[in-house]
Amino acid sequence: MTQPTLRNKFPILSHSTYLVSHSMGAAPLDSRERILEYWNSWNDLGITAWDRWVPFVDDCRATLGKIIGAPGRAIAFHQNVSTLVHSVLGTFDWSSSRNEVLISELTFPTLKYCLEVLKGTGIHIIRVPSRDGISHDSSDFTSLINARTALIMIDHGIYRSSAIIDIPPIVQVAHQHGARVLVDTYQTAGMYPLSVTDWGVDFAVGGSHKWLCGGPGASYLYIRPDLLGTLKPQLYGWMAQREVFGFAPDVQPADDARAFMTGTFGIPSLYAAKVGWETILEVGVTPIRQHVLHISHQIIRLAQERGLKINSPLKDEARGGQVCVGIDNAHKIELLLGKEKILLDSRPYCGLRISGHFYTEEREVLACFNALDSIIKR
């Protein structure tokens, strides 16, 4: 997996020990050329560059769709997931009797924020507790779904533990009760083989700067195809129109997911991100998953040999990409390792988060733990 030709595509690997792809994937060298390609089209074509950029966005939708198992027309882009989640939430009538949203107590904070600011609209937020503080069984959610449930918002991978949530059983029960499901794939897409179509979810969101190695600013929203054309987003702009350059005087939404793309968005971010997506497809998500698990086994073994607590599920099928290692003063240790060009991160309730990607070598994990030993001895 970690052939020199692959590692050479990521310059940061030549001068650092990079164990933080769960938070920010390494930058592909080819992204620099693609960003220059964007600038050249802007410089050479001026306003007529839009004739190239608009079809390019459709190419991006098709490419990403191959990774998450979705048709391109069912995908919309925006700079961040928060905006896309608000677009989805705006399609619900929270003043109705079906006004409950289920969300994990372990969920990434931005999803909680998106819901909290809607208090006063009639929305009723139910925080689903975790039995062990790091994971969820699907029954934690399904047992709470009823006729009042409007939406279940789920992280496929939990950011502070790397636990995986089994999505299909939740979708099945939700749909039996007339509720919808939104899954955040930010922590897993590009590293974990998945298909939003096979899951049957109504919505899925995610971004490109983690396992997809696409940098920030290229987040995505998937909408179940049979819902397209039936939803009315409250966040709306000219790029969502059926004819982008028709400048119609009234609202005429596109008949696909572009209806959720609001106004002018980050074309440069898509130029950079598409390289990352293409690299993931070149390597293959299944081989990536196998290598990430291999590196995870080493992380777990070295941590346990030192008597450190693992704050992630130990079973491969229950764990995402990173391993969360419990240790005192995790943030301080993160900074000290960073001074030695060993890059990982830390989070509250978690400890150190350490991961490998397809470009990670075993020697890098060993170097990390050797450096950790030196820090602890100080």
Image: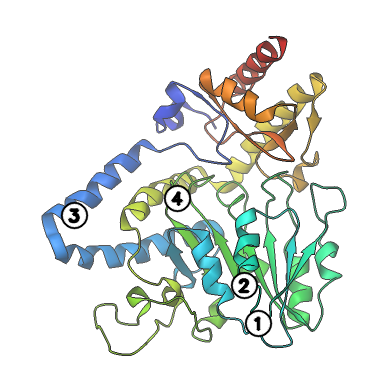
Is residue 346 toward the left or the right of residue 31 in the image?
right
Q: Amino acid at mark 2?
A: Leu
Q: Amino acid at mark 3?
A: Ser
Judged from the image, the secondary structure of the residue bearing numbered disc 2 is: loop
> Could you tell me how far apart the alpha carbons at marks 4 and 2 are, in whole angstroms?
34 Å
Is residue 148 toward the left or the right of residue 181 in the image?
right
Between discs 4 and 2, the one toward the N terminus: 2
Q: Quadrant of residue 126?
A: bottom right
Q: Which residue is mark 1?
A: 94
Q: Residue at x 21, y 50 (%)?
A: 39
Q: Is residue 255 above or below residue 301?
A: below
> Could you tell me how far apart the alpha carbons at marks 3 and 4 are, in whole angstroms?
21 Å
> Could you tell me how far apart the alpha carbons at marks 2 and 1 are, in whole angstroms?
9 Å
Q: Which residue is mark 2?
A: 118
> Could you tell me how far apart the alpha carbons at marks 1 and 3 are, in whole angstroms?
44 Å
For this rendering, which residue is in front, 2 or 18?
18
Between discs 2 and 1, the one toward the N terminus: 1
Neighbourhood count class around disc 2 (C-alpha, 10 Å): few under 14, some 14–19, many 20 upward: some
Q: Residue at x 51, y 21 (%)?
A: 341
